[in-house]
């Protein structure tokens, strides 16, 4: 049966990729990147489902502080007309039920044909075969999900507004440094009971070895720009480094995208087991950058359950 162009146009308009956003800025960027890459592949729109933030007292939507095209479309950010507004809640409950069924030795629930829940931490090859009308739920922490749009993402993930006074001053210091290296020391919620047992906490041995390997690679001493949500802890962890070589970046906690952009302006990077500094290093466009990353991305017991090999882009060095 032949279809009129008008009918075909209306049918194509129904196709849309929806991605549920949760977590902090780094997580939101991974989720957006995967959804956007899939939408670009099919030539359809991307819709951002923000319903996961409704009851989250710690996290909020932050992509609107970047040049993300869809971030200004807040009127449609809770799902397309063809998706129920509780898409996030349905996906979350489906994930929880799957865990219970797994413990009971029973098969997982069959997901709707147009819904995709990330099945594991490493890259899922089935992602490439998803259709043009799919709802995504997961973390998607691998460059393999979005390598096809890397250059565009670096543009979209730049700050929408000029730096504030503090960040602008720090940028001047970074640009004036002969060898600026970003060092991320993550604490914050990582030290909370339960969270620490999941993520793990990087201590002095990791940073000592990472910095030693970095400086042997670049064959010179570096000026270290320290990014941390706990400057006191960072000072203790990096006590083996002369203070004259440390610059503490005292950013605005309400403007985390600025710290990430400052990380990206450094020459090389020592990152934490954090999606935040992952992106700070990834956004650095230099092909000669050296990135040191922790091999133990999770605490030992959790690391045994996950394949993290797809987490690290080619060329990053594991410590």
Image (tube, rainbow, N blue to C red):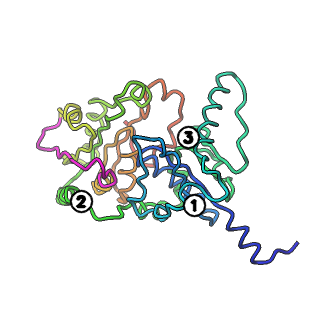
Labelled pair 3, 1 in contact (Cβ < 8 Å): no
Residue at 67% from the left image edge and 57% from the top image edge? 82
* Secondary structure of residue under mark 2: loop
Callout in the foreground (3, 1)? 1
Callout in the foreground (3, 2)? 2
Q: On residue 46, which mark appears?
A: 1
Check disc 3: other Cα within 10 Å, few if <14, some if 14-19, many if 20+: some
Total tally of numbered discs in the picture: 3
Task: Determine whether 12 is above or below 304 in the image.
Answer: below
- Which is more N-terminal, label 1 or label 3? 1
- Which is more N-terminal, label 2 or label 3? 3
- Which residue is under mark 3? 122
Q: Quadrant of the C terminus?
A: top left
Q: Quadrant of residue 36?
A: bottom right
Check disc 2: other Cα within 10 Å, few if <14, some if 14-19, many if 20+: few
Task: Determine whether 51 is above or below 98 in the image.
Answer: below
Give the CA separation, mark 3 to mark 1. 23 Å
- Which residue is under mark 2? 164
Region in magenta? 241-259
Looking at the image, the residue that sits furthest to the bottom is: 5
Looking at the image, the residue that sits furthest to the left is: 244
């Amino acid at each position: 049966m032949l279809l009129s162009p008008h009918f075909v146009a209306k049918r194509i308009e129904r196709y849309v990729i929806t991605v549920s956003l949760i977590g902090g800025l780094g997580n939101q960027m991974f989720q957006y990147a995967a959804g956007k890459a899939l939408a670009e592949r099919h030539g359809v729109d991307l819709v951002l489902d923000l319903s996961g933030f409704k009851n989250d007292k710690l996290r909020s939507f932050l992509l609107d502080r970047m040049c993300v095209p869809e971030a200004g479309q807040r009127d449609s950010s809770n799902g397309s007309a063809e998706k129920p507004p509780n898409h996030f809640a349905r996906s979350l409950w489906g994930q929880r039920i799957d865990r219970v069924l797994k413990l009971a030795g029973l098969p997982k629930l069959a997901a709707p044909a147009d819904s995709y829940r990330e099945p594991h931490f490493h890259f899922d090859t089935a992602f490439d075969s998803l259709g043009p009308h799919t709802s995504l739920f997961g973390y998607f922490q691998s460059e393999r999900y979005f390598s096809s749009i890397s250059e565009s993402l670096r543009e979209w993930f730049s700050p929408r507004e000029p730096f504030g006074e503090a960040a602008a001053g720090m940028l001047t210091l970074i640009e004036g440094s002969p060898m600026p290296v970003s060092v991320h020391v993550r604490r914050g919620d990582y030290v909370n009971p339960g969270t620490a047992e999941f993520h793990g906490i990087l201590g002095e041995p990791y940073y000592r070895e990472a910095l030693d390997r970095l400086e042997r690679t670049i064959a010179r001493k570096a000026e270290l720009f320290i990014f941390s949500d706990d400057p006191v802890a960072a000072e203790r962890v990096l006590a083996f480094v002369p203070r004259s070589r440390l610059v503490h970046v005292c950013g605005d906690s309400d403007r985390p995208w600025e710290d990430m952009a400052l990380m990206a302006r450094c020459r090389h990077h020592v990152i934490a087991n954090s999606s935040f500094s992952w992106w700070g290093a990834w956004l650095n466009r230099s092909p000669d950058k050296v990135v040191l990353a922790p091999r133990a991305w999770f605490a030992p017991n959790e690391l045994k359950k996950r394949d993290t090999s797809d987490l690290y882009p080619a060329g990053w060095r594991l410590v």
